[in-house]
């Protein structure tokens, strides 16, 4: 049942290779932006803050290879030596996410095009075509030379490949690669025509050469083509990753390799990618002015931990504001610490930032650094120092330890890709938002959750939650059925199991076996709700976003029905045995209560009783983390006596947490 | 005066050829999307539902011509035979709205470009350039072969050319065609320069070769060029239609030919097109969650009936939700029936759907079918069966009969095209919305209206309503003046008669003869209103959207004046004799009351007195249709005794209609 | 310190050459749009209205050069003679803003491209590439011939080059020109790489050939590249201007040359441009339905006067509505007169319109003219006549006189260009809006202000106001410091002095010398506010848009502090001595009060005491203009006895102004 094996079993290094008992603390460091005098000041402040790891080189290609084939490693030699001299480990990045200007000039074939045929020129970043043979050749060469030169450097602790892979390409070389990819996937044109349903709108392909990316069309692209193009894009970017990974791994088989994900980013099948990484790392930027920022951060942390199947790396966060929102808020005092410790609570063994020193020039000069424009006296750096100290205090108790969760939330990128296309029942249904709503309700209920892929082995979880998996493969349906059959409790949100792997609607609009599982005789119609529209239910629950015209099977238990309107009296929530179906998106408190009830029935409980709202409680290893996400102080009942690792003091029966306060309790 | 003759008089078949006393009932049928086993099930359900007509082949090009010049008719032979065997007529569509992928691959010249120069690639539909000689050659060939093969097939009842013609093209081949079209229209460059007013902004053309479509410009395209490009686009698409029509008509002179309009679609001069069709058909998709959906449907039905000058065909409607709105609502129980019977009430002899069986794949898999994903037990199909039965009940009394109307509403696409351009007094003025507001007020007043072109013969109408005709030709002005001179009552909304056929502003900002007709001495300024702004009038009427600074002539009757603001005391509504001018858009109830009053004065009356709001009453032939568009039951006073064809029961003095209830009364 | 000298000192003609004691009154005149019979009517009406100046030829290129190299001057000869015959001066425009269609057809290299690579085609206007050698050659030739032919014509009073220069170009010829411009600016690639901070994101250029305009990028263009591209665009357009200017100046050294600015237009460094003009002229179109329209007009007038360093020309205003807003309002009765006299009050010696006679065709046929569609009996023309008479009454007292102001507002296009880019703290900060807020507060306080460039000599101003200068050169910082050191009072808004000339963030996030000047020890963080968010301060002031986490120096005077929220107790407004820093945007009344207080302390006072709100009072030369911007009559206390030049009557102690009323008082 598990989807894991992928690469043949091998003994690869892990994050532990780099942490060696410490929590990695530091960030992206771009010394090439500064005169070498500043490096000395950097080292002084790094040591002051307890920085033990920096990521170097992510945007150094033009510096390392100023002209095609030339190499300028001198500055990096000096930097690596300097770091080593001061005991700071270096995560060395391949610079391949930002090719130098000469590459676009000499090789326009390396530039990507969007669906409208527009070139993405150099002058920004990530302007490379994943399908360009020229780009890949240059990328391999610089990676090879970097690995050869620094593979044995004592400062080197890890490899970081590229940065935030994300660039799609609709151009001609990508079209050729797409055809190769499809040929491999489908074998025959007949199979492709069947999978894509090309009988619709006269799209039958008589030649592989006729297939193109889903470029701008007059009206509505073929959805299976779009789905496959997203799969292809993820796979091609992954090919770029593995090509570079294999080079560095050949030079340094003892060092782990990572690339950084963006948080819940739609563009990569991160389950698949994680299988190819030694260390799973993520960039995480909740909005500091979002009162639910910590809650949404928890989702990304749980997802990353689940992908890593153990300790993970927070590769990037911001010490202060970012620069890409409409209005970019700084972090209020204490929030950086809260969210940093939250990451550790949820399994991180590395807490890093983009970036060490805020840039004075370039497109991100308004993105904060650990050392902000205000310098070492700025509040930002002062808080960074405190966080460094806190991490040192708790590291001995946390590094390498794991969390266990009773609850699993299922997520799959292919379902996301298939569901978010043009021409669907409601453009108001945002896959990520639905995921956040369900995970957030678990968070509100203080229930720690893992994430899992719908084909993963779910044994051991008391409760499996499916917020929305529009596309489910046969194997995934088998998996869910088997899970319930073996005693598991399953709760599914709407628009689940609608389509098969080719985005082909399942008979009856929802997989018949799932309908039977939940006790749905007929799914007559989907009734999406308008902006601002809600629908009341008999038990007081209020539905949002969606409702459904369902006919229950005879053996179904109708938990609540819609009240009023066209659906009056029809089931809103129903179940057969332990398999629940929720045909609307309950309002946050209603969803929380519903999940609390189902979880309790399944034997899944919060780490503590009586937890106040907004207080996050997570057990990692033997530790109990308590995190106050509110600005008002709060008292948490904690039976027994514990030691708070952060303060060193003993606490009995209760803990009071100040604004954004944290306690890390050990028995 | 009438603009009709167009093609030389000939005896062409009509819709009656296909209906033969029945109301056509059925829909688009795409058997190529299903295994042939499913066809048997289709036939069973079609017969169950009373389906007697299916439209086949609209998107079958790639199936029929899998490679250039090849033909695969076997499946279609079998399908045609099967339909015939079961007594189901086939409207055979030419597949030319969706060329196969090989066409774009081998002939990129067939692909259209938008105003920004972006190609519209294959992978959707309607990706053909109307000006492409290559496309036209292939389209003619497949049409020829289809007509030759199936012209004599007994299942064949009608031809359907292409589907929802709409694709513009700004590319080079279209540019050459545009020049040819202009040369034909204007003869000389001088005439073109005069018509386009190229003395403005130095746009004088010294060569036909210098003329291009109105592609992306730095600032504001020439409006007459834009207007002519819209005329050209409509004409070129019409050329595509007539080329295919002439082919099939040669093979089957006895069978009618149609193409389906989109409802009140801006892209075709549907008056002109209708002249070239044997059957006028339309696709109609009011929003089921729009409480005025039935009212706006009535407009499209009246327009289509007027274009058809007799019975017309509802080619497409949805049995449930569509998939192209932001939020796509199903039809509540009863609404499909209500709107289907409304179409018959307003003159349709064919009630069809897109599509028979909901697709499982492709871009429209969330667009409902008569057989939805829920299958034959779904509510959707169950209601379709009931509608089929209703139509059979009333067909003997309705097919071939006509409506008469006392009121004509004038509409002209050229006026629309000229008025909705950049750089005008108010972008808030939406031609279609204004048309809906005026027609809707007539509907609210229970007044049945035809539509007419401003150059049509208006004799016989008691009241002519001009919601807005920004552009009026001299002939149209003559026509209006003659109509009033001969005793007709005319009421015009603002922005009427502003421009001549070349979008040249008439002296004084409004045709002087019209100003004299209404009693306007000087039109000082237009005062468009802001979002949310209204303007009160002395008699309680509230104006929206627009107001005007008018000076009345001495002989004018000022019906009401503006109150407050800059226009205080100036005429809002004025008239001379039977010629009324309304310089604002009254709020719905105010406009209804105004039209009721004017209509009453002109001797135009509703079919019944005392009709409740939301109840539509229409007389077709000898029948009286009563349709309740509300969800609450309502009682309608109907003097005398009638038989309700739907229930077979007799009713006296009043009829009670349930939610979405319909009665079809015969004396 | 002053940035003025630019061109070597020379004796150039000024606006006085053209006015000769009169206020120029008239507008753009496009006789080629009308039959010559109409010209006679034009002359009759012009004389009736007192028109003494028309601008001819701005869009006549296709008429003057109907085919490449041909010339058709006959019509213009007749027109010039006609104007001369009737004593109407002609401002002759070069027609180079709208190349004829043949130019694009024969020379596609003359067409500009946008950042997405899209061509801007002919069919509108301004479709020329500033970098095109072909365009420049044709433009020079037609200019040469015009100057040669009409240089000695007695009707000619001034030259008007092109029209509203604004078109950027991202194409290949522009790219080559950009490289030449950069080479001249930076000399070496090293210098460019340093200035652009290309070490960020691997953008180091190894070859001049690698540099392109900031075309569409995958993510965030280099901001210094964007800044330089905007500088380059302004400079290239200026080159186009000076090339034509030098041609006409050679032929007519005695006649002044201008080109018309758009009001507060972002695309040109108007300080730099003004240095190259003999007459500074501007187009001004406040929204007639904006109650603050007159206030925002005052800003443009003050800016234009300051650029002109003396009398200036209102080249274009609208007698009624424009056609480019969403909803285009006419001017209520009296508003045209009010705003025309306001221009004179604020230094204009020319009050002109676009255009004389409203066009019947073309893209601006809904833009009003002095003679509107309603003709000579229309309200619009009747008001124009009155304005002409008013201007004749006051001209003897105003022409050539100057205003003096105690207050200077600093503005710099480079600061604007650097600050309004992607990836900044808040996209809600709109440079122009902030400028309007501050200047508007001065207007509300009845304080007359000049504008100045931050490197201009500020001596003589009692108060210097810096609404926001994100970028300040070292020289500008020197200038501000020197100004305060020499006794001046300075008040600065937030986001000032953040970056240097290369958009490099100053140490500490704000120039250290400025921080010291204001008494800011540490600028910890910027706290931009969300839409609708405000922040209260201790003294009742309410901040909007922005706030800051500041730490005051010991010697600073904290004028008020933030109350509540994260910034509770931190300085909102502080100063050291006469140097004030305002870290938020106070609400309008709060900002007015703050500036009144600071101005009073600096000895800057309104022209009169006790001025009611909405009444503008300006002293020009010996005259006192009083302008009522409200619709309600108002009485203004004016000590002593004056004569009102408009009415000829004497007024004592007070003046009553009706709706939109104006008095021009002389002692």
Image (tube, coloured by chain):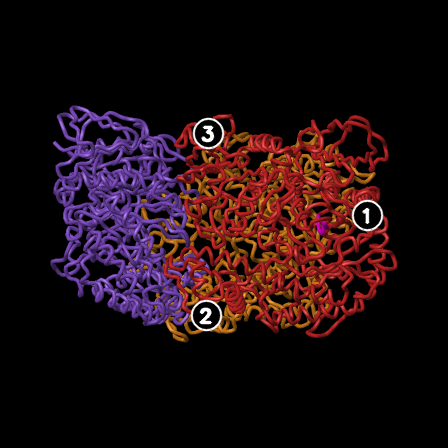
Chain colours: A purple, B orange, C red
The answer to whether B289 is drawn above or below residue A101 in the figure is: above
How many neighbours does mark 3 have within 10 angstroms: few (below 14), some (14-19), or many (20 or more)? many
Which of A269 and C561 lies nearest the eye of the viewer? C561
Left or right of C489? Residue B600 is: right
Asked if the residues shown at circle 3 and circle 1 are in contact, with their CB atoms under 8 angstroms apart, the answer is no
Q: Which residue is mark 2?
A: C209
Between marks 1 and 2, how big is the CA–CA gap? 60 Å
Q: Chain of mark 1?
A: C
Secondary-structure class at tag 3: strand
Magenta stretch: dominant SS?
strand
The answer to whether A546 is drawn above or below residue C350 in the figure is: above
Q: Which residue is mark 3?
A: C561
Residue B229 among those drawn in magenta: no
Which of A433 and C267 lies nearest the eye of the viewer? C267
Q: Position of residue A406 (x, y in %)?
A: 16, 39
Secondary-structure class at tag 1: helix
Q: Chain of mark 3?
A: C
Please indicate, yes or no, whether residue B92 appears anywhere in the rendered image: no
Label 2 vs 3, first from the N-terminus: 2
Image quarter of residue C95: bottom right
The answer to whether C31 is drawn above or below residue B593 in the figure is: below
Q: Chain of mark 2?
A: C
Label 3 vs 1, first from the N-terminus: 1
Which of A204 and A472 lies nearest the eye of the viewer? A472
Task: Tell me which segment is drawn in magenta.
Answer: C312-317
Q: Which residue is mark 1?
A: C376
Residue C313 among those drawn in magenta: yes
């Amino acid at each position: 049942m598990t989807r894991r094996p992928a690469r043949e079993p091998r003994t690869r290094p892990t994050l532990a290779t780099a942490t060696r008992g410490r929590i990695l603390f530091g960030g992206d460091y771009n010394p090439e932006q500064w005169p070498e005098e500043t490096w000395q000041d950097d080292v002084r402040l790094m040591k002051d803050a307890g920085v033990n790891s920096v990521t170097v080189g992510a945007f150094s290609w033009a510096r390392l290879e100023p002209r095609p084939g030339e190499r300028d490693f001198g500055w990096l030699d000096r930097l690596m030596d300097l770091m080593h001299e001061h005991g700071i480990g270096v995560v060395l990045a391949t610079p391949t996410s930002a090719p130098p200007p000469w590459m676009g000039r000499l090789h326009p074939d390396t530039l990507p095009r969007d669906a409208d045929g527009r070139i993405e020129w150099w002058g920004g970043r990530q302007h490379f075509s994943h399908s360009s043979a020229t780009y890949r050749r240059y990328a391999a060469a610089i990676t090879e030379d970097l690995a050869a030169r620094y593979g044995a450097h004592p400062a080197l602790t890890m490899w970081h490949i590229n940065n935030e892979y994300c660039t799609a390409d609709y151009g001609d070389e990508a079209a050729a690669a797409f055809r190769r990819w499809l040929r491999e996937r489908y074998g025959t044109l007949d199979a492709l025509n069947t999978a894509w349903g090309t009988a619709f709108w006269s799209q039958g392909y008589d030649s592989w050469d006729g297939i193109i990316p889903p470029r701008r069309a007059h009206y509505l692209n073929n959805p299976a083509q779009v789905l496959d193009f997203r799969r292809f894009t993820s796979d091609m970017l992954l090919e770029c990753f593995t090509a570079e990974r294999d080079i560095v791994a050949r030079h340094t088989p003892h060092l782990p390799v990572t690339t950084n994900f963006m948080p819940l980013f739609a563009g990569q099948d991160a389950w698949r990618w994680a299988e190819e990484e030694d260390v799973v790392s993520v960039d995480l930027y909740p909005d500091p002015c979002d009162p639910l920022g910590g809650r949404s951060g928890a989702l990304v942390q749980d997802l990353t931990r689940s992908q890593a199947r153990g300790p993970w790396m927070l590769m990037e966060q911001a010490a202060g504001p970012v620069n890409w929102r409409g209005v970019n808020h700084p972090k209020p005092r204490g929030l950086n610490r809260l969210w940093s410790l939250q990451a550790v609570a949820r399994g991180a063994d590395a807490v890093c930032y983009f970036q060490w020193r805020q840039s004075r020039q370039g497109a991100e000069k308004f993105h904060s650094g650990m050392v902000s424009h205000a310098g070492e006296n700025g509040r930002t750096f002062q808080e960074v120092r405190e966080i460094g100290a806190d991490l040192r205090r708790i590291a001995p108790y946390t590094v390498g330890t794991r969390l266990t969760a009773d609850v699993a939330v299922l997520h799959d990128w292919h379902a996301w890709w298939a569901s978010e296309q043009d021409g669907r029942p409601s453009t108001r249904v945002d896959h990520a938002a639905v995921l956040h709503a369900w995970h957030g309700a678990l968070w509100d209920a203080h229930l720690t959750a893992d994430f899992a892929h719908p084909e993963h082995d779910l044994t051991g979880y008391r409760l499996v939650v499916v917020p929305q998996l529009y596309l489910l493969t046969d194997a995934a349906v088998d998996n869910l059925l088997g899970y319930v059959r073996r005693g598991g409790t399953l709760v599914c949100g709407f628009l689940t199991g609608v389509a098969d792997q080719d985005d082909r609607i399942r008979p009856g609009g929802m997989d018949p076996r799932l309908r039977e599982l939940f006790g749905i005789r007929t799914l007559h119609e989907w009734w999406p709700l308008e902006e601002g529209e809600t629908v009341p239910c008999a038990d007081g629950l209020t539905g949002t976003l969606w409702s459904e015209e369902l006919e229950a099977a005879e053996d179904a238990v109708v938990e609540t029905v819609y009240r009023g309107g066209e659906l009056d009296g029809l089931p809103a929530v129903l179940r057969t045995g332990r398999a629940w179906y929720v045909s609307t998106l309950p309002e946050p408190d209603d969803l929380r209560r519903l999940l609390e009830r189902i979880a309790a029935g399944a034997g899944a409980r919060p780490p503590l009783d009586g937890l106040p709202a907004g207080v996050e409680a997570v057990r990692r290893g033997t530790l109990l983390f308590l995190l106050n996400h509110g600005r008002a102080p709060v008292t948490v009942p904690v039976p027994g006596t514990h030691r708070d690792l952060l303060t060193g003091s003993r606490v009995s029966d209760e803990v009071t947490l100040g604004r954004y306060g944290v306690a890390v309790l050990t028995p």
